[in-house]
Amino acid sequence: MTQQTADETAGAVPDEEGYQRGLGGRQIQMIAIGGAIGTGLFLGAGTAISKAGPSLLLSYAVAGVVIFVIMRALGELLTYRPVAGSFAEYAREFLGPFAGFVTGWTYWLFWVVTGMAETTAAAVYVRFWAPGIPQWTTALAFLLVLYAANLISVKLFGEIEFWFSMVKVTAILGMILIGIGVLTLGFSDAGDTASVAHLWQDGGFFPKGVGATVMTLQIVMFAYLGVELVGVTAGESENPEKTLPRAINTLPLRIALFYIGALVIILSLVPWTEFQPGVSPFVAAFGKIGIPAAAGIINFVVLTAALSSCNSGMYSTGRMLRDLALRRQAPGRLTRLNARRTPAAAITVSCLLMGAGVVLNYCVPERAFQYITSVATVCGLWTWGVILASQIRYRAAWKAGRLPAPTFRAPGGNWSRWLSLAFLLLVAVLIAVDPGARISLYVFPGWALCLAVGYAVLRRRDPAAVHADPDAHLHAGDGN
């Protein structure tokens, strides 16, 4: 099925796709945590707070419930059939070959542009300490280092992601513990003014109205992008039937602690009126407390978050592109694994395209981040919608006796999935009515047209490539 070398890595246990199942439970847990904590929280929350005030907490809570529904639906699919190209494979089986084709390429695009954005962001953060270094050189250096690490082994990827996540988790837990100390003991420069009353004073819990709170949902959903990455690790997890459900089940705790808990503390230490768009709320809170070098500390944490996201991008794009190649929906050479059973060819192609972000950093460094993040949220919404729709079709199939029941069932009936789909549609509408975010909807139709043309050409030249599983329609059934 693949063109990988015959050499086996010592101790490797390859699965049916040829990958080494080298990600342990410790790494899966931290990948899941890291996927839920990124620059959207460390930086984006400042803009959202300035727009909605304390009611932003409600946006994170509601969106968090939807994300949990999506992840439990994904968990049900993963325990049914744990594969590396999970989202595209499930779309292909339960929604049809065109949906699988679109999902595979769209999720690949999502992480390519995210990789561009995060290398750009990392280069910007380095300028905090070294303003004289050209932005494009730093972006290129980060890209090359992470590329080399991803080629070595999946274990190294998992270990890097583990420590990146540890930095983020430590920073947030430190902020929470220090904040609790300030609120209860009254020490530090913020001791006299810090109070949980800031959550309802200064204009109330909805200081700018319910409408402003609803409009922040698109910012909040962007912050959650990447939480589904744990699904891509299914093909390389040592024990996916145990580690993946455990990682998914702890998601509500992670959202409650790292998002809602951290923001409750921050909004209690600093009145929401003092936050500014584009300024990290963590920097504002650390500065208010009077911690020395607060800006430098948070800048390091945010740099780590950006590099973590880029590292994840290289991992997921390589696996998704190879899955497309295995389906003959991408060039066959991209199926090759190196001696360490990593998809070296697919990672290399993806990394080269991420290098376009370096070019943008050279040509238009001041607008590079805006340019290359225009499609990320829409790609994420599509992926989440496909997960929900696939799980609905799968549940209909196993209830009808056409497929085995999952060992990890999503709670609730189909109504929770349909409500979550409606929520994702609402977020897409909010993006359309927001002039600042609308550019993503300008880009996506062009991408959809490219995919439609590509699929039509592929179907004409190689019909078997779009019907690689002739029994898929029997698995999915009619969905009734």
Image: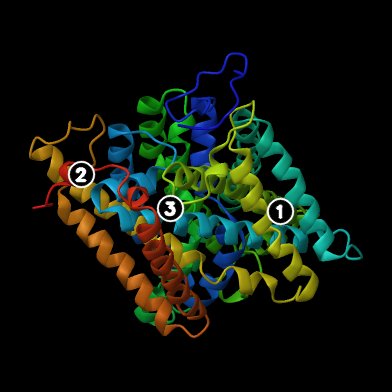
Tell me the amino acid under the disc marked 1.
Answer: Leu
Query: In the image as oriented, which residue stretches furthest toward the front?
Result: 461
Q: Nearer the viewer, residue 393 or 246?
A: 393
Q: Earlier in the sequence, mark 1 or mark 2?
A: 1
Side of 228 relative to 191 (left or right)? left
Q: Residue 431, position in %: x, y?
A: 42, 77
Of badges 1 and 2, the one in the foreground is 2
Q: Quadrant of the N terminus?
A: top left
Q: Is residue 87 above or below residue 295?
A: above
Query: In the image as oriented, which residue stretches furthest toward the top?
Result: 11
Which dot marks residue 152?
Answer: none
Q: Is residue 472 above or below residue 61?
A: above
Pointer 2: what residue? 394
Which dot marks residue 303?
Answer: 1
* Label 3 element class: helix
Q: Residue 72, position in %: x, y?
A: 30, 43
Side of 241 relative to 286 (left or right)? left
Q: Nearer the viewer, residue 42 or 23?
A: 23
Instruction: Sort mark 1 into few (<14), some (14-19) or many (20+) by Cα contacts within 10 Å.
Output: many
Pointer 3: what residue? 104
Tell me the amino acid under the disc marked 2.
Answer: Tyr
How far is mark 3 from mark 2, CA to CA? 19 Å
Of badges 3 and 2, the one in the foreground is 3
Q: Earlier in the sequence, mark 3 or mark 1?
A: 3
Q: Is residue 394 visible?
A: yes
Tell me the amino acid under the disc marked 3.
Answer: Gly
Q: Quadrant of residue 367?
A: bottom right
Residue lying at 77% horizontally and 58% vertically, measured from the top left: 139
Q: Earlier in the sequence, mark 3 or mark 2?
A: 3
Q: Residue 230, position in %: x, y?
A: 46, 41
